[in-house]
Image (cartoon, coloured by chain):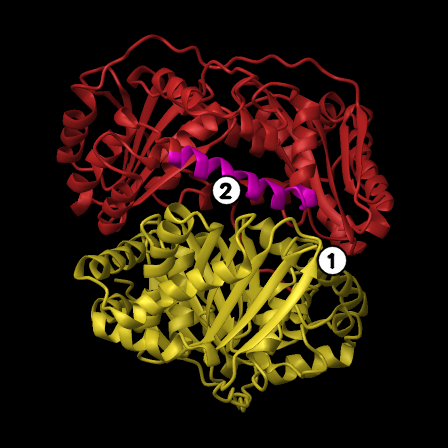
Chain colours: A yellow, B red
Amino acid sequence: MVLFDRFTLDNGLKVLVHEDPTTPMAVVNILYDVGARDEDPEKTGFAHLFEHLMFGGSVNIPTYDEPLQRVGGENNAFTSNDITNYYITLPAVNLETAFWLESDRMLSLAFSEKSLEVQRNVVCEEFKQRYLNQPYGDVWLKLRPMAYKKHPYQWATIGKVLEHIENATINDVRDFFKKHYNPSNAILVVGGSVKTEQVKLLAEKWFGDIPGLEKPVRNLEEEPAQTEERTLTVQADVPLNAIYKVFHMPSRNDENYFTVDLISDILSRGNSSRLFRKLLKEQKLFSEINAYLTGSLDAGLFVVEGKPLPGISMQIAEEAIWHELEQLKLEQVTPDELTKVKNKIESTMVFSEMSLLDKAMNLAFFELLGDADRLNSETQKYLNVTAEQIRQQAQQIFRPENSSTLYYLAN
Amino acid sequence: MIDRTLAPAFGQVENIDLLHAMPYKLDNGLQCFVIDGGDQDLVRIEFIFSNVEWDMTKPLQAFATNTLLNDGTSQYSAAQIADKVDYYGAFLQTEYNFDQVTVTLYTLNKHLKSTLPIVKAILTDSIFPQREIETFILNQKQKLSVNMEKNDFVGRKVFNEALFGNTLYGYDIDAAAYDHLNRSQVAEYFRKAYQPQNCTLIIAGKVKNETLQELNNIFGIDWNNAGVATPNSFTFGKAEGAEHYVEKKDALQSAIRIGQIAINRGHTDFPGFQVLNTILGGYFGSRLMANIREDKGFTYGIGSALVSLKNTGYFFIASEVGADVCSQAMSEIEKEVNLLKDQKVSDGELDLVRNYMLGSMLGSLENALSHADKFKNIYFSGLDYDYYDTYIRVVRNITPDDIIGLANKYLNFENFQKVIIGKK
């Protein structure tokens, strides 16, 4: 159980406080409701590039990291297709420094040309390090546009191509900031050795006078139902063949999300999971095989990926995957197997409560979903899932015409 | 109106309180330590075994044995072990590092009675079915072939071999090493290493009296020693610095890894060296990051570290940089290393690093599990909690002259092994 208090400033900033007196530390987490899905299709990768620029100095404070490190703090951030999340951990006695830094960059950035130039290079190197200079690194650059034809999930957070990042201008940066980085578009969570009253005073003092703007309206084109099977074959300088199969599935806020999440656990969580046991251990068809969800806020993807062993044809590998998916459509999972994946959910939830930062990030994320308190009822939602629901969702999702398959072949 | 240009007042971290580990022994002499704390009704139990009797003709023995522990006992098949662990929502992990192998159980307390007997079975009664060994070898070779396409992975291998030669720390594991692995090597290693006298048990979380009782019942009564295994012992001389370049024609980036043999935690210079390392490349605001990422934009990340091993320590700098700027990046790194030897670090920078390190230390003590990790650092280096008092004192009081002295003593760019994978 993660307890919290919640209030909203006049400018629209939502603030949540989680008091945890067992630690001498404090966490300040700010989630901005903006991600790669909010980008212009001709300027992709921008939300993430912008995240880098948030560390390039703000209107009244020339550097962000230095004053924070000086008070014993650490910080980082990440951008996804849905959100941009910034977090600080620091000794609780120095909490006010975090408010000072975070509020100033919400008020306004320095918009330094030098920072833009350097971070364009840094992000291009990140693009190369993670996507281009790694075996199989470009898989998601290929899968996303196969699965999504209308919705902006068709590009990765890093962007479609290096050129989009190289061409970003300071005016793009200003426009993006103005549109997305305002109090009504943010959720602030403060946790640790803090008091709600203290946080109220600090929030008013530092964030209270930032002008409130209307929360930007998101109007994304929904991805139409897929009606034909999609496949793509690529050749690359990799040592092993690989297969990637993705299916459209419900959004994070859909009541069936939990059922589908459990399906991925049945297939792929732990050494007792079906894909690992049957296809890797028993039939020795794959050297690696996994299933997981993208977990996105809008309708996401169910992913099955594997590397067939040498001598195993793509056709055999694919048929073996289909066989396991068909089983889920045909037969209900046994009570033991269902209990097993539910027990894992329960213990994972308890373990995650050991980390202050995890708690703060989760509160922010669930508040964005609609109510931070859903963090505390999440486990129950999983426990309520039935074997029949699993079978029905499997039937709904695991259809060839709902799938996109990438055959990634070794040269 | 508030003046936003003024930083709020702040304080240095005053008290850093560590939860001390409580030692006790099981009836068979197995050494245990308990770190009790936290509200969550769970524990992490680590069975830590020293790596023993290194034999370079069987370089995969320790790693393979520990990884294959999950794969069958005389009572349970691999599938049954997995079923039981997963059914109770537990996590059973095997880890291997240069000095030790670890079998870790994460479990809710309410399932402890069901999960501990599985651990007992795998630690005392693993049979390593031939079929499982074959699967392991096959799949590991595939993974290796993928990893060999990653420049940073290759860089780490080449670097370790340059520093540590044919010891366990440096041995270059290739596909042939997997081909030579067999069941009798694994069974032999299992007999030698998995004994109570070679094991340390660390229990962290909400630890109850009945848990300790249960541990003794299961691991303390009929688990006996059989023949003494000798823990690995290596000595390393100082080698001449050299360049190790592996060209990759189509590389967009080059992996850089450079450094040398240094000292480990037991050495009195270790805390001071950690301050020196932090300044150079140990945090986001470090000189290497400030210059090579934040000023030049050559890389997504660059860092340095001082690593303490049982038989030695080493220092390294690592990055992946644009292939076209690799040489420039190397000379900037050299410049930064030499600067620390020639010029005093300013009080402002040193104070920042002090505060950062103390805050980071405080932040690393999040829960009983992280307190246990702090204990392992000292215990396996043969140190006690005084080490952390010394560490904190050094971080608070080290002077710019001390830093210059340490830089001149330990950082000699000419003596570095310099590994570049990609293009230069």
Main SS class of the magenta portion in the image = helix
How many numbered marks appear?
2
Give coordinates of residue A99: x percent, y percent: 52, 65
Residue at 31% x, 68% y: name it: A328
Depth-wise, is mark 2 or mark 1 nearer the camera? 2
When the figure is inspected, residue A381 is found, relative to residue B354, above or below; the finding is below
Circle 1 — which element?
Answer: helix
User: If the image is split into quadrants, where does the C terminus of chain B sit?
Assistant: top right
Circle 2 — which element?
Answer: helix
When the figure is inspected, residue B204 is found, relative to residue B11, above or below; the finding is above
Give coordinates of residue B401: x percent, y percent: 72, 27
**What residue span does the magenta drawing correspond to?**
B131-152
| Residue type marked 2 | Asn
**Residue B139 badge:** 2
User: If the image is split into quadrants, where does the N terminus of chain B sit?
Assistant: bottom right
Closer to us: B126 or B223: B126
The quarter of the picture where residue A388 lies is bottom left
Q: Chain of mark 2?
A: B
Does A105 appear in magenta? no
